[in-house]
Image (cartoon, helix red, strand yellow):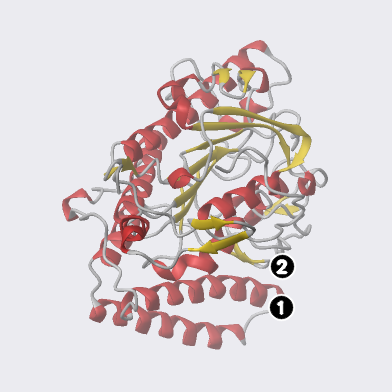
Amino acid sequence: MKNGFPISRRTVLRGAGATLALPWLEAMLPAAKKAKNRPPVRMAILYMPNGVREDMWTPEGVSSAFKLSPTLEPLSEFKNDLTIATHLWNASAKGGEGHYIKTAGFLTSTTVSKTLGVDINCNGVSMDQLAAKMVGSRTPLASLELGTAPVATGVDTNVGYTRVYGSHIAWSGPTNPVAKEIDPRLVFERLFRACTPNNSAGKEDVLVLDQVQDDARQLRGQLGSADRQRLDEYMSVVRELEVRLDRVTRPSPSRWKPRARLDPAGKPDAMPRQHAEHVRLMLDMIALAFQTDTTRICTFMFGNAVSNENFAFVEGVSGAHHSISHHQNDADKLRQYQLINRWHTEQYAYLLRKLRDMKEGESSVLDNSMILFGAGLRDGNKHDPHNLPLVLAGKAGGRIVSGQHYIASPDTPLANLWLTMLEAFGTPVERFADSTGKLPGLLA
């Protein structure tokens, strides 16, 4: 070709009153090869508990002519990679109570059933798990769920909801929250074993799981109805793990190979004691998972709902997160609240920086990703699910129009964003939860 560009398969010959498509030509081959070698798209959701100081969150200006807010200022070097969404809300979380339904229903856009824990039900499947069901078989791990806090147990008697709801954003089914890993050492081991599969080790793991299930069946007959329900919920997580192990150990028809080498020397030394270090290590694990292509879908919870992590390690903060978020417009609490929000933004920027520095030909892992950062409520003092704080970074391999403050119509369903992201990820669906359509102007 004169200019070195391949012919598109959609090229047609036009004549008087007729249009004829060209047959396959060798000139089309370079474009086909390029498409075949295109890096995969990744998707991660980073969930921050307890909302934000709203007057310090929203950028000034619209579209590409926007100025980052004080809380989002740490993202300045990524301005052209960002899509900051305003006016999205989760209608399914408008009732009930302040935190639990907004956390469990964040990625499902559904209203969870009120329960003390015997019959948990989020009444949907989270968008990440819907994508994992569709394309998860292409990688050793269909998805990766991470956090910093263990699953909370018991009932929050102030609102009458089980604390389990506040511990999960990923749901593979209405009654099946997906277990998250909080130890970065164990995450690294999972990634390493997936990148260097050892069939004998995997078979041993499956044998252990078989033993666990045998013991559980014997135990179940000795329990009351409530405990049987809790045991069944736990075993659904065990079965999910078994499926993932089977995927790692069986021969892959697509002959998957890691896109980068995972150095065993990179394994964390110990379970971190400090929250800041813990968060950074878990973000490192996301970066490694995406760089090696061990998985393309990840969720991370900075903390559970109602997290009261002490943020005294941040200069200018002297208290715990949840307590400070109930600021009641106290000036000093609002100041500390914003500092905590900004710290979370800085951690988000840390991950984006790592992904940007991981090159894939002429692009980067960040270019080929969608990394969402946000919360299930606006202001921690009001528990409002309107105008949620949401930032999306990355271009999804050219499928997302980034570098904009995206102002939707007031009360646009959050599910419209999930619908749009599923489209960009390559797992389109006609509708998701209460969606009314994809967000116009967000898809390239």
Q: In the rendering, at what x and y percent does residue 388 appear? A: 68, 35
**Amino acid identity at mark 1:** Ser
Front residue (pair 12, 101): 12
Q: Is residue 209 above or below residue 46?
A: below
Residue labelled with disc 2: 118
Q: Residue at x 77, y 33 (%)?
A: 409
In the rendered image, the residue lying farthest to the top is: 331
Kindly state the secondary structure of the residue where label 2 is placed.
Answer: loop
Q: Residue at x 33, y 55 (%)?
A: 34
Q: Residue at x 27, y 48 (%)?
A: 270
Q: Which part of the image, by quadrant, shows the C terminus? A: top right
Q: Residue at x 48, y 48 (%)?
A: 44
Q: In the rendering, at what x and y percent does residue 174 appear? A: 68, 66
Q: Is residue 398 left or right of residue 102?
A: left
Q: In the rendering, at what x and y percent does residue 365 appear? A: 35, 44
In the rendered image, the residue lying farthest to the front is: 16
Quadrant in the picture for residue 440: top right
Query: How many numbered callouts?
Result: 2
In the rendered image, the residue lying farthest to the right is: 95
Q: Is residue 381 left or right of residue 151?
A: right
**Amino acid identity at mark 2:** Val
Q: Is residue 203 visible?
A: yes
Kindly state the secondary structure of the residue where label 1 is placed.
Answer: helix
Residue count near mark 1 (Cα–Cα under 10 Å), binned few <14, some 14–19, many ≥20: few
Residue labelled with disc 1: 225
Quadrant in the picture for residue 314: top left
Residues at marks 2 and 1 touching, judged by CB atoms closer than 8 Å: yes
